[in-house]
Amino acid sequence: MFSLVQKRRWFYLLSSIIIVPGIAIMIYSVVTTGALFRLSNDFVGGSIYELQFTTSGATEANIRDVFEANANDDLSIQRLGSADANRWSVRAAFQDTETQGAILEGLEQIAPLDRDSVRIEQVSPTVGQEVAQAAFVAVIIAATVVTGFILLAFREVPNALQYGLCAIVAILHDVLVVSGIMSLMGLLLGWEVDALFLTALLTVVGFSIQDTIVVFDRIRENIPKHLGEPYETIVNRSILETIHRSLATQLNAFFIMIAILLFGGDSIKQFIAILFVGLLTGTYSSIFIAVPLLVSLQKGEIPFFSSRKPTIQAVEA
């Protein structure tokens, strides 16, 4: 039988090679920018402009010049649709009505605006803070619910708490990988964390825990069926019996996301890219982190959290 869990230390090393630089990048981002990521107006507050020009002539450079002339240095400017559409989205600092009027007058010097199509939204910093707090609480609640469900579902399995701990570690693994990538892209390409990023992150958590529970459940079923076999053999058998299901489910999603990345609109590509990375690391962590970590706990390889005896011995007793 092909061995997977016996190579668990290599999987731990691979994850460390990815996660440790990601944490270093986030620390660097905090030192240089004051935040783990570049934050959008959804979190820091500001004004969002959706502009429709009636003729060509508007470019990112001359739009930026108009906003910077009105004391707006921290900008996010994005073209909406094709170049012929002449539509732009601009995120700027929070502004009063007088400043907004001056900006619109400056934009009119670039090209005529369709004033009926211009939309300006204001997001207060207070709303942004509430969104961030709600996202943090949502992740905590998700981890708590996952642990409670596993304790209930695996109550007849010795050391059921360890299954919950391993699932949470897998979630933390995925969050750290996605956060590190997002922080890096913020520094390199100016990507900003917005509500869609939180949506992608929570989706990743859901997919990851689903795959993890599938393998854990197969381990639970195989323990009484294969009494006398080493625990590692049972776990390895369970992975091989379920890996095709995990890969088939994720590959379908990957193909769709690749198509969207290649042919979709610019406004959604960042969300899809983060979701793609998250589902990729979620699939990896379910098979190569959560389950091997369970073996390490059962074999007493991790101090303070490990059981004295492997699960299979407890069942036989």
Image: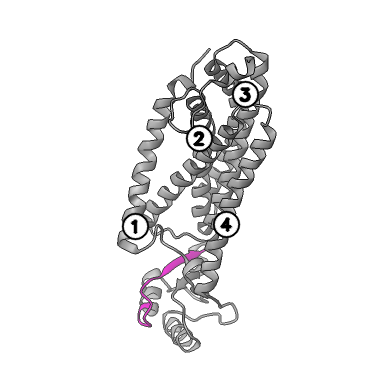
Q: Distance between the residues labelled 1 and 2?
A: 26 Å
Q: Distance between the residues labelled 1 and 3?
A: 41 Å
Q: How crowded is mark 2: few (under 14 residues within 10 Å), some or many (20 or more)?
A: many
Disc 2 marks which amino acid? Ser
x 49%, y 43%: residue = 172
Q: In this view, does 287 lie above or below 223?
A: below
Left or right of 305, for residue 21: left
Q: How far apart are marks 4 and 2 (CA)?
A: 23 Å
Q: In which quarter of the image is residue 158?
A: top right
Q: In this view, does 65 lie above or below 81?
A: below
Q: Are marks 3 and 2 in contact (CB under 8 Å)?
A: no
- Give the mark nearest the N terminus, 4 or 3: 4
Residue beneath disc 4: 137
| Res 29 label | 1
Q: Is residue 159 above or below residue 130?
A: above
Decide which of 100, 84 is in the foreground and name it.
100
Q: How far apart are marks 4 and 3 (CA)?
A: 31 Å
Q: Residues within 10 Å of mark 1 (few under 14, many from 20)?
A: some
- Chain part drawn in magenta: 68-80
Decide which of 65, 186 is in the foreground and name it.
186
| Res 219 label | 3
Residue beneath disc 2: 285
Task: Return the x and y of residue 143 as percentages of the image width and height.
Answer: 58, 46
Q: Do the residues labelled 1 and 2 touch (CB within 8 Å)?
A: no
Disc 4 marks which amino acid? Val
